[in-house]
Amino acid sequence: MSVPSDLPVWHELKAHHAAIADLHLRDLFAADPGRFSTFSRRFGDLLIDFSKHRITGETLGLLIELARQAQVPAWIERTFGGEMVNHTERRSVLHVALRNRSNHPILVNGADVMPDVNAVLEHMRKFADQVRRGKWRGQTGKRIRDVVNIGIGGSDLGPKMVCEALEPYGDPTLRMHFVSNVDGAHISHVLAECDPESTLFIVASKTFTTQETMTNAHTARAWLIKELGDELAVAKHFVAVSTNAEGVRKFGIDTANMFEFWDWVGGRYSLWSAIGLPIMVYIGMEHFIELLEGAHAMDEHFRTAPLEENLPVILAMLGVWYIDFFGSASQVTLVYDDYLRSLPDYLQQLDMESNGKSIDRDSQPVTVNTGPILWGGLGNNGQHAFYQLLHQGTHLVPADFLAPARSPNPIGDHHAILLSNCLAQAEALMVGKTEAQARAELEKQGLSGEALEKLLPNKVFSGNRPSTSLFYRQMTPQVMGSLLALYEHKVFTQGVIWNINSFDQWGVELGKQLANAILPELKGDRPAGGHDSSTLGLIAFCRAADEQQP
């Protein structure tokens, strides 16, 4: 397959869209009292309700047929089988091997990767146990109390998000910090909260050359040596997640405390690997295994379930429906769970770095819309900020609502109020408010005549705005694993439909290359040149400001 729009079912979907585009969700629910049962599924403690989507049974059937004609099942098997599906980087894509709890052989170039995966996992366990039990001590003999993960991108977003999400399972004696921004304010604020005698740094960089990560790591190293007065302290307070043993050694880290991963682990899919070391340190091996088990359960479902019942496939195809047939440019993630506050940031990288592509697998320009602009935040806060656009704006923005049925912190009516808002917003987006309903409300308030007619249009909500509700009994490591794997496989499936490589990210390279050229010009090591007038003007402004500092 090269052009998805050439597939026979694509044209059927275009015609079907034209036929049902004006159908309102109010009418679909009124016509089918059992619609929730038809368009919702359970997966363990996860309930996924997609009944508030602008679809019929025929729509879903055509979308599943699109997945079939695009050869999604074959691509699933190729990926799980260790084939080189990341063709531009000539790599297998096997984050599923990292959580392969059945331990069946997974081959790359004829070699089973599972012994290495299990060896690194055991290495992580031994180290995490030492820290958690107080056996790993700093240079002065103090127990570790602060753990600072230094990374960026996938080396930061995943571990940070999971540690926050699973805080109820975390070691209460440990404080977790995550430094990613090269802005000196970030590392400065974190170090100000830490005692050098009881702080452990985890430096996560595959090459041990990532500019932002290593800049922050060297700043942390200099701070530690200054505070403790001994360069040998580095080995007691730093460990590395990397493949560059020589670079790790030169930094002062004992390579026995270097945790490896492999080129078939992409950054945004890496929290299951040694990149997840801060997660294991925080929640312990037992809960980390539960996280892996939850993901593995979803992996097996994705690999074996018929397309009609395959949850990642269903969610992926609903996304394709809006992106390519309704012309939706964005999707919003609305979390009614404070522990999941960083999930939208994590999903932004997962989705937009994976499917933000305009060149297909045949190195040709794509002919359809690909990945959406993904955004979001805490739902309750968003109600008082950006929900106005969702309800009455000119853009159709499909939404994912996430919420726990039970709170780990039951306080008065807090959780009931939280859930009522979540449920109400999803319902309001779906049903809207008709002109007749708005008129009756205004008349009840005593308005009439010209004043009523002028205000009336502002009180009408079109509704018919689609959403998926992903509810869980309560957040556990297993639920977290299943949820994240669900989103991973959804993104992959959409990439298959669009015939793009979801596993490379060449688009991030150009800015890095140009930054390397600009840096010496900013520092005054060489004259600025070879840039456009805007860039030159901005460099001059920054140079002048720096020179004027007292």
Image: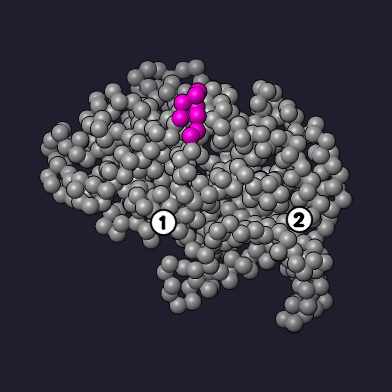
Tell us which disc is closer to us: 1 or 2.
Answer: 1
x, y percentage for residue 121?
A: 36, 40
Q: Is residue 443 visible?
A: yes
Residue marked by disc 1: 166
Three-letter code for the amino acid on which mark 2 is drawn: Arg
Left or right: where does residue 139 sit relative to residue 36? left
- The answer to whether 248 appears left or right of 397 in the picture is left
Q: Which image quadrant is residue 452 in?
A: bottom right
In the rendering, which numbered label is found on residue 509?
A: none
Tell whether 461 sits left or right of 206.
right
Q: Quadrant of the C terminus?
A: top left
Label 2: state its secondary structure.
loop
Q: Which residue is mark 2?
A: 54
- At x 15%, y 33%, the residue is 232
Observer-nearest of 402 and 104: 104
Residue type marked 1: Leu
Mark closest to the chain's N terminus, 1 or 2: 2
Give how far apart the Cα atoms at labels 1 and 2 are: 34 Å
When the figure is inspected, residue 138 is found, relative to residue 366, above or below; the finding is below
| Residue 340 in magenta stretch | no
Residue at the (53%, 49%) spot, across then down:
297
Q: Secondary structure at mark 1?
A: loop
Of 180 and 543, the residue lying toward us = 180
Query: Which residue is pictured at 50% across the width and 71% down the height?
Result: 415
Residue 226 place in picture, x, y as percent: 16, 38
Q: Is residue 105 left or right of residue 394?
A: left
Q: Position of residue 465 (x, y in %)?
A: 71, 58
Residue 165 % position (x, y)? 44, 55
**Magenta residues, start to end:** 105-112
Q: Can residue 330 be spotted in the picture? A: no
